[in-house]
Image: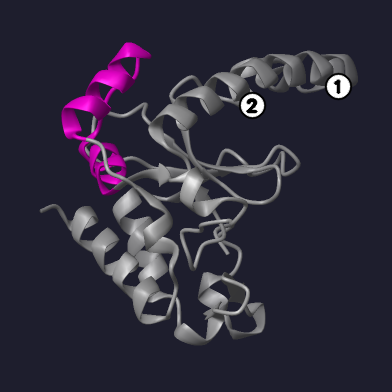
Amino acid sequence: MSELATLLVELESRWTKKGSSDSACMAPGLDREVVIGMLEANGLPAPAELADWFGWHDGVNVELAGSRWVLLAPAAFMPFSLHEALEERESWIQDAGRVAAEAGAEFGPELPEVQEPSFWWESTWLPIARPAGGNVLAVDLAGTSDSVPVLVVEWSEIDDFREVRSESLTAFVRLLLDVPDPYWRWMPEEQRWVFDFAELPMEFRGKSFF
């Protein structure tokens, strides 16, 4: 078992110890061959980390979750299935073309880079989870490594939305496991997570995951 696979099991165990029932709402994982086949059919590589990610759980079982937000606690993101991720990618690519055209009309020659759709969404980016807001957690599949960098794409933050927030999915999950217990707790009466930002140490703030 890879380090990422081990950490994901540990993260899910942490949910259960805190009293969360979210594990029961997660969909079963996909076989590695299925992940590879779906990505390759869309012209994308299949790094080992991504196969481990979707091999853990293929997003959320919406029939069991209903209207509940099943989160990658302590991060406030709900994971996509691989099918949803690929659909979301196509949607973001289309939206990037529209935003680039609008930016061209607004900024003209002052900022030529923002007039390119790839400035707003690279074809190698794959969304893997979403928050309640309009941004998205994505990985960059441009490299040849088994690990994939993690980004939080939020177009309202034009100065730094392309910035890599974690060097790999393994590092991302390791960071989640390092978040202190007082920051995140499960509310059994409401069947949801509560996050107390006042309890989040300074070293975790500004990472866009919390």
Question: In this view of the protein, which residue sits in the foreground, 60 or 167?
Answer: 60
Disc 1 residue type (three-letter): Phe
Percent across and percent down for residue 203 are 51, 74
Name the residue rendered at 78%, 13% in the picture.
101
Identify whether 124 is placed above or below 43: below
Q: Rounded to the nearest whole Å, what is the CA distance between mark 2 and mark 1?
A: 15 Å
Classify mark 1: helix, strand or loop: helix
Q: Residue furthest left?
A: 1
Q: Which span of residues is magenta-colored? A: 31-56
Can you give x and y, in whole percent of width and height, for residue 178 in the image?
Answer: 38, 75
Q: Nearer the viewer, mark 2 or mark 1?
A: 2
In the rendering, which numbered label is found on residue 135? none
The residue at which mark 2 appears reads as 120
The C terminus appears in which quarter of the rendering? bottom right
Say whether disc 2 or disc 1 marks the residue closer to the N-terminus: 1
Could you tell me which secondary element the residue under label 2 belongs to?
helix
Q: Residue at x 86, y 21 (%)?
A: 107
